[in-house]
Amino acid sequence: VWLLFCVIGQSTVALTEFPMDDAWIHQVYVRGLLTEGMPTYNPGEPEAGFSSVLWLLVQLPAVALAGHSPTAVVLAGKLMSLVCAAATAFGMAVLVYTLGGSRGTQRLAAILTLVTPTFAFAAVSGMEACLGAAAVVWALVLFVQRRVLGCGIALAMAGWARPELGLLVILLAGVSGAGSQPGGRWKRLLSLVLPSALLGAVWVGYCLVVTGHPLPNTFYIKSVGLNIGAQIAGYVRVVVLSGGLPLALLTGMLYLIGVGTLIRQ
């Protein structure tokens, strides 16, 4: 109900438009996949100007059903965002349950996920943010449940949803190496890393064939004049401290508790 209000509660424009042009860009590539079998922006010219391979594939059925109606295409994109948001919230409840949380705590985790303002915006944006979130949450669920290969596949999906989420493979591989028995350590690490390595190789290979560069065009465009220090400072200011220092300290504490919990698993 909350997420539907976010879609239709403000104005009718929310039903017929995306809030960011990135969503339309992905839709153009989806249309290229449907009509030409390749992600094209201009007809007959395969490109790598999109950041989320998995988001293109996930949207294919909905966009195919939407046809050529712009309003239907927008609704299809928003619907897939909503589905991914619901999968993320459900995954949060399962994660809390797996870690031994009460039924009330499980419900609270799901509710807080859905009503977080930035997440609610992402859920109706027609973009891949909630898809990446769902992949990460379910990767953590599978990791805690010691289903290592399933976790590795979910991590690979996360990397195809958002390239920067591939860094999570390194984090969980480190946690797994620190917490696993010596006899099964290498098998666990291989199960975690190999799926991401294979899908990453496919994506790099595609980019090399199409553009001659190993990474998508969006990386080279956004990395021009990139100042790492300024980016970190901006992240701390906009993301970490935007909710106030107490919330930032609480988030940091919970993050450390979460990492410690994963290591003990």
Image (spheres, rainbow, N blue to C red):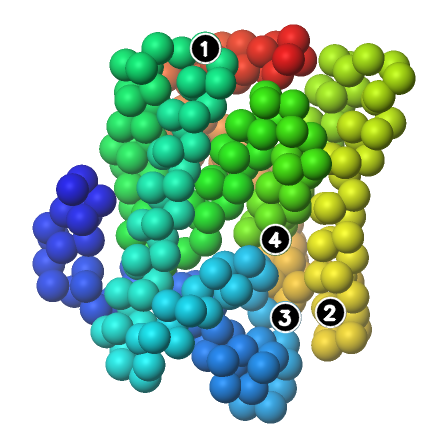
Q: Identify the image quadrant of residue 261.
A: top right
Is the residue under label 2 in contact with that under label 1 (CB below 8 Å)?
no
Cβ–Cβ under 8 Å for marks 4 and 2: no
The image's mark for residue 160 is: 4
- What's the distance in space between the residues labelled 3 and 4, CA to CA? 13 Å
In this rendering, the answer to whether 254 lies above or below 119 is above
- Closer to viewer: mark 1 or mark 4: 1
Residue bearing the label numbered 1:
100
* Image location of residue 185, percent across then percent down: 84, 22
Secondary structure of the residue carrying tag 1 is loop
Q: Are marks 2 and 3 in contact (CB under 8 Å)?
A: yes
> Within the image, what quadrant is residue 213 found in?
bottom right
Q: Which residue type does callout 3 highlight? A: Ala
Label at residue 206: 2
Residue plotted at (25% across, 33% down): 115
Lower sequence index among marks 2 and 3:
3
Mark 3 sits on what residue? 48
Q: Residue at (63%, 70%) from the top-left corner?
A: 48
Q: Give amino acid for label 1.
A: Gly
Q: Is residue 43 above or below residue 150?
A: below
3 or 1: mark nearer the eye: 1
| Quadrant where the C terminus is found in the figure | top right
Work out whether mark 1 precedes mark 2 in sequence or the reverse, and give the earlier one.
Answer: 1
